[in-house]
Structure formats: structure tokens, C-alpha cells
């Protein structure tokens, strides 16, 4: 056998100085297989491949090449007849021809690999079907990509976790890793003791969240005892639904929050009850994109529902709270330094919507005097919208402040309260507050809202209460209060605390009705235009001035470009002072403060868009079309 040596120097093939034609063919072919050919060498190889003795020469060359490189020659045997049957003109075509020629001997290996992979898949599928839980269908026969786990008081933690063979305890659940698409079913109407922990190892996906829920029609209860019932930490795409979470009671041993969502994203809480925890029933902490629906928080201490970011960061964002209730959250018996007993509260947040929610009978057992709780409110927050909500009969501790319906508090910016109803709260219906040390308060709006008989107990004594303990007008500016109806048989319409300095506070197209004096305290810098004022006792009374014309002239109020734009008439509401509705779903039918059809107030106000560039929203309190010049919240 004639053999030509192949030399490898620094990874390259070097030719001998003298070569005959066959030696040159073997050399060029070996070099080509190593992808080191020049274009000229490829052309030479193509010509040499057309020679009759090329197959024998190259067969010998391949034997030598495989021996020296240690490769399996059976995978690279070449059918030279196939190569000769084609016209080779360039390197690309040479590649194609060699691939086709060598595939004949390689295809059995491909088949073997495919069979091997298929066997692995079948084994994995069998193990998956027979592991605890299984990739199957949920109770509604919807296909899932994840597993279904079942927990039942009659189960066994050594079982598979399937519906027919369920686990028994929360402890078993906490020991497994949940994956996207997994669903955990607690048997309905049963109670399970312990604290569920979902952490960063348990992560769902957009189309396949991890779901923790109840099996069947009723709801299971998770009893956290003296601790937290559920913690979801540093994870995403988790759904918690159709469950009850309970603690041992705010004064009976529990010292924790009930349900905690901490540093998470893409979380849904739907149709859950949270009861009997000393701190917050539901705490959303430094999380993003959290949807809260149909939560009922009751008998908790500090708050019913709290969304809170890290101090100074507003890193809790894109929070949506809807159709939820905070009722009878009395106060935290261990907190003697700050407010407690709030209904729904957000702080250090941005982009928050609270809608169709109800807060009532909160705050009555706060264990201190001082700043107090509010039904629904926010502080140190940006772009908060509170709408279509009811807050009523909330309270505060004897001798303490607040206890109101709604509140835009210290450091709030670019936020709005609209289409909301407040009545019979011990504090003001609408608090407008700035505390010393908070971030700047500015560019906030309250519109198309109703307050009835609020503020009779706390220091407010009015439906609207304004306070600024910083006493710096640059810290407390640009409030837009328009098209609201404030009705108070028990006190004033508006109250200014002794410290209430402000700048750019504008009151347009409102109806203010008070028991006697419509305004309490020293009003500073506020602009009143297009409002209707009526005192039930005196017809008109503002800090002792009982003549509307005298008050306007003395205080330069309700005068725009030299003409009177305000009113002092009885609004003749349909049924004032008799509010009894408790559900936001009834707000559209609530018409107690409807104006008579022939009332001058229906079109006697200012066109806010035309005069001041204010986009008023176009909808009245009950979502009917609002006239551009209308006064009050309801038409």
C-alpha cells in the first residue's frame, strides 16, 4: 500500500516537498477534511477527484487519517460513486456531496440516537405520572402543564399527593418544590393548621401560574394560630384563591400579619378571607403587579389590607385592589406609638388603584391617643386612584384624631379620589393632610364625591379637614377639589386646623351644606369659585359672617373677573342625611343627593376646561354624563 504521510504542525497540515498525483490527491483531501484548504487547493482537489484511481487512493488516505486523528472511520466512509456522479465546482458543492455520500453509513447511528431519546422521554413520562401529584387535568377538566396536589385531613404525608391518595399537612407541602402550572387543592370546608411558605424555588409562568386553592364548592381554612398563615416571598406568577386564613386573634396570642406577599411580582389574590391577626390581615410588601380581588379582611389589628414599600423608595407598584372589604379591624393592642385600625392603606407606593371597595367600623379599639386610623387612605404615594368606594362609620380611639372615611396624606402626589361615598365617620369624610417630614404633597384631586354627616366626633367636626404640620406652603400645594357634595347636619362643611398653610388649593363647583358655620378655622390662600353654600341653621354662616355678600366682599371669594360666580341657595336634595347603602355595587342607584330638574345649580357653575384647562372627567357621581357647568356631584 502506497501511503503518504500527513503532518500536523500547530494544527495545520504541511505537504512534503515532492508529491506525485495520487499523493497530492490524498494530501488535498486530508487537508480539505480539516477545513484548511485554500480556494486554489479546492480547485485542484475537484480536478483530481475526476480521475479513475481516486477512490483507491482516497480509501488508503482515509485509513491513515482516521488512525492518526483517532476518529471512527465507519462514520465517515465515502461512497465515491455518488461523488463521481456529481459535478463538483466549488467548496460548497464539495461539502454537500461529502455529506450525502457519508450519510449512508451514518444513518443507523441517527436512528439509534432517536430511539434512545424516545425511551428516555417515555421513562420520564412514566415517572411523572407516578410521582406525588401528576401532570393531568384539574377538577374542571382543563389541561394543565403542571401537577395537581391534594391535601385532606384524612390523607397521609407518605402518600402520592394525588386526589385519590392525598397528603395530610401543610408541612408536607412546604417540603416540595412547586413548578409552573402546579395546583394545590386543600379540601373544602376543612381546616389545616400551619403556615404555608411559597418562596423563590416555587415559581410560575405567565400562562401557567402556581395556584393554591380549595377543592370543591366551599373554601378550606388555613389556621396560622399565633403566626402568619401564608407567606409568598421573592417569586412570581402565583395565584391564591378561594381560601380562608385565620389567626388566633389580635388579643388572643397572634402577633403577626395574616397573609404576606413580600418582594414578589405577578401575584393574584382572589376570593380570600383574612381574620384574627394582630398586624395586617393582608400585607403586600415591596411587590410589583399584584391583583387583589374579593378580599374580606376583618378582626385584624393594625390594618385590614396594607400595601407598603420600602421607606423612601415607593417600590411597591402597580397594585390593583378591587371589590374588597375591610370591616371591623379595631386596632393593634401592641402599638402605642402610631395609628392602627385602618381599613385599606397604601404607603411608599406608586401606580395604585383601589376601586369598588368598602371600609367600615374600623379603628374603634386603637390603644392610644394621637394620630388615628382612616377607612381608605394613602401616604407617601404617587399616582393613586381611589374610586367607586364606600367608607362609613369608621372610628378612632376616644380623644384621638382621625377616624375618617378617605385621606390623601403626607407625601402624596398626582393622585385622585373620585366617585366615592363617605358617611357617618367619626373623622372627616375627606382628609387633606401633610405631616412634617413627609415628602412634598402636590397635584392631587378630589372630585364627584359625597360626604354625609362626617367628622362629628374627632377634632375635624367637618366633612372636609385640612391640616399641614410642616407649615410650609411649598410642601402642601395644588389641590383640585371640584364637583363634590358635602352635607353635614352635625358640623361644618370644611375645617382648617390651626396649622393648615397651603398654596394653590382650588375649590370649584361644589355644594357645601353645614349645620351652622360652613367653615371652621382660619382659611388661608384657598380659592373658592362656582360653589354653592348653605347653612341649615342660618342660610349662610362662615366663621360668624352670616351674610353671603359680605363674606364674598370681605374675603374676595366667589368672585371671578369682577362678577359673582357662587351661590347661596338651598340645594333641595332628594333625600339628604338618610344614606344606608353598604355595597359599592349600589352606588349607581344611589340618588339621595340628586338636584331638582329645574335647579339653577345644574348649569350655573364654571366651565372648568374652558377657564382653567381642567379635564373634569365627564361623568357624575353615578356615572351619568356630567354637565360642563354643573355644581355638585349628582345631577
Image: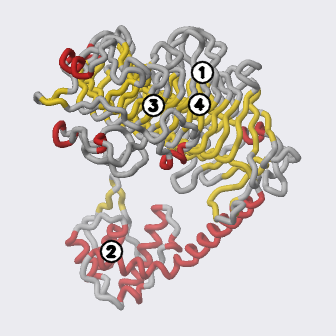
Q: Secondary structure at mark 1?
A: loop
The residues tagged by marks 4 and 1 sit, at their Cα atoms, a distance apart of 9 Å
Task: From the image, tell me which residue sits under label 1.
Answer: 363
Work out whether mark 2 precedes mark 1 in sequence or the reverse, and give the earlier one.
2
Structural crowding at the residue carrying mark 1, measured as other residues with C-alpha within 10 Å and reported as few (<14), some (14–19) or many (≥20) = many
Name the one closer to the observer, 43 or 293.
293
Q: Give the foreground label among 1 and 3.
A: 3
Can you name the residue that lies furthest to the left here?
562
For residue 249, what is the image quadrant?
top right
- What's the residue at 64%, 69% (across, down)? 118
Task: From the image, tell me which residue sits under label 3.
Answer: 451
> Residue 360, labelled with which disc?
4
Residue 71 horizontal/vertical position (percent): 50, 64
Name the one closer to the observer, 327 or 191.
327
- Direction from residue 128 to residue 624 in the image, left or right: left
> Residue 401, labelled with which disc?
none
Q: Quadrant of the N terminus?
A: bottom left
Q: Secondary structure at mark 3?
A: strand
> Residue 23, labelled with which disc?
2
Structural crowding at the residue carrying mark 4, measured as other residues with C-alpha within 10 Å and reported as few (<14), some (14–19) or many (≥20) = many
Amino acid at each position: 500500500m502506497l501511503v503518504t504521510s500527513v503532518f500536523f504542525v500547530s494544527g495545520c497540515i504541511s505537504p512534503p516537498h515532492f508529491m506525485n498525483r495520487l499523493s497530492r490527491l490524498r494530501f488535498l483531501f486530508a487537508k480539505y477534511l480539516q477545513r484548511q484548504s485554500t480556494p486554489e487547493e479546492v480547485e485542484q482537489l475537484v480536478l483530481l477527484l475526476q480521475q479513475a484511481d481516486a477512490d483507491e487512493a482516497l480509501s488508503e488516505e482515509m485509513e491513515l487519517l482516521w488512525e492518526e486523528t483517532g476518529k471512527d472511520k465507519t462514520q465517515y466512509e465515502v461512497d465515491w460513486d455518488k461523488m463521481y456522479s456529481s459535478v463538483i465546482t466549488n467548496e460548497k458543492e464539495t461539502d454537500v456531496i461529502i455529506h450525502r455520500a457519508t450519510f449512508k453509513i451514518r444513518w443507523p447511528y441517527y436512528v439509534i440516537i432517536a430511539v434512545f431519546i424516545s425511551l428516555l422521554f417515555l421513562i420520564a413520562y412514566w415517572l411523572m405520572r407516578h410521582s406525588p401529584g401528576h401532570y393531568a387535568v384539574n377538577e374542571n377538566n382543563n389541561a394543565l402543564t403542571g401537577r395537581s396536589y391534594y391535601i385532606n385531613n384524612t390523607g397521609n404525608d407518605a402518600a402520592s399527593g394525588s386526589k385519590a391518595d392525598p397528603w395530610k399537612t401543610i408541612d408536607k407541602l412546604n417540603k416540595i418544590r412547586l413548578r409552573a402550572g402546579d395546583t394545590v387543592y386543600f379540601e373544602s370546608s376543612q381546616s389545616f393548621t400551619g403556615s404555608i411558605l411559597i418562596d423563590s424555588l416555587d415559581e410560575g409562568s405567565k400562562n401557567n401560574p402556581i395556584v393554591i386553592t380549595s377543592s370543591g364548592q366551599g373554601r378550606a381554612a388555613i389556621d396560622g394560630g399565633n403566626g402568619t398563615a401564608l407567606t409568598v416571598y421573592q417569586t412570581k406568577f402565583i395565584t391564591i384563591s378561594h381560601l380562608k386564613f385565620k389567626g388566633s386573634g389580635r388579643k388572643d396570642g397572634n402577633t403577626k400579619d395574616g397573609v404576606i406577599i413580600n418582594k414578589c411580582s405577578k401575584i393574584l389574590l382572589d376570593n380570600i378571607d383574612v381574620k384574627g391577626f394582630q398586624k395586617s390581615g393582608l400585607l403586600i410588601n415591596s411587590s410589583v403587579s399584584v391583583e387583589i380581588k374579593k378580599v374580606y379582611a376583618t378582626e385584624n389589628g393594625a390594618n385590614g389590607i396594607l400595601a407598603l414599600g420600602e421607606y423612601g423608595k415607593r417600590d411597591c407598584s402597580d397594585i390593583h385592589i378591587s371589590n374588597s372589604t375591610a370591616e371591623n379591624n379595631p386596632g393593634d393592642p401592641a402599638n402605642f406609638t402610631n395609628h392602627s385600625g385602618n381599613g385599606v392603606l397604601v404607603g411608599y407606593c406608586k401606580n395604585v388603584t383601589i376601586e369598588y371597595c368598602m371600609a367600615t367600623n374600623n379603628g374603634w379599639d386603637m390603644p392610644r391617643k394621637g394620630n388615628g386610623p382612616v377607612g381608605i387612605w394613602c401616604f407617601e404615594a404617587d399616582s393613586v386612584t381611589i374610586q367607586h368606594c364606600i367608607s362609613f362609620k369608621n372610628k378612632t380611639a376616644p380623644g384621638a384624631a382621625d377616624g375618617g372615611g378617605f385621606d390623601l396624606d403626607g407625601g402624596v402626589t398626582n393622585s385622585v379620589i373620585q366617585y366615592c361615598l363617605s358617611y357617618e365617620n367619626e373623622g372627616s369624610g375627606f382628609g387633606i393632610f401633610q405631616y412634617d417630614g413627609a415628602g412634598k404633597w402636590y397635584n392631587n384631586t378630589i372630585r364627584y364625591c359625597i360626604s354625609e354627616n362626617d367628622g362629628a366626633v374627632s377634632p375635624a367636626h367637618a366633612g372636609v379637614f385640612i391640616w399641614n404640620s410642616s407649615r410650609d406652603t411649598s410642601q402642601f400645594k395644588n389641590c383640585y377639589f371640584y364637583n363634590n357634595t358635602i352635607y353635614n347636619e352635625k358640623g361644618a362643611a370644611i375645617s382648617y386646623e390651626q396649622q393648615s398653610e397651603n398654596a394653590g388649593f382650588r375649590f370649584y363647583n361644589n355644594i357645601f351644606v353645614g349645620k351652622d358655620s360652613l367653615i371652621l378655622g382660619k382659611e388661608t390662600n384657598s380659592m373658592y369659585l362656582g360653589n354653592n353654600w348653605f347653612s341649615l341653621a342660618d342660610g349662610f354662616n362662615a366663621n360668624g359672617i352670616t351674610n353671603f355678600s359680605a363674606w364674598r366682599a370681605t374675603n374676595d371669594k366667589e368672585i371671578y373677573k369682577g362678577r359673582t360666580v357662587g351661590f347661596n341657595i338651598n340645594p333641595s336634595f332628594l333625600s339628604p342625611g338618610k344614606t344606608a347603602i353598604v355595597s359599592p355595587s349600589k352606588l349607581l342607584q344611589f340618588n339621595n343627593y340628586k338636584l331638582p330638574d329645574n335647579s339653577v345649580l345644574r348649569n350655573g357653575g364654571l366651565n372648568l376646561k374652558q377657564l382653567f384647562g381642567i379635564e373634569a372627567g365627564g361623568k357624575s357621581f353615578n356615572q351619568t354624563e356630567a354637565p360642563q357647568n354643573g355644581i355638585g356631584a349628582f345631577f
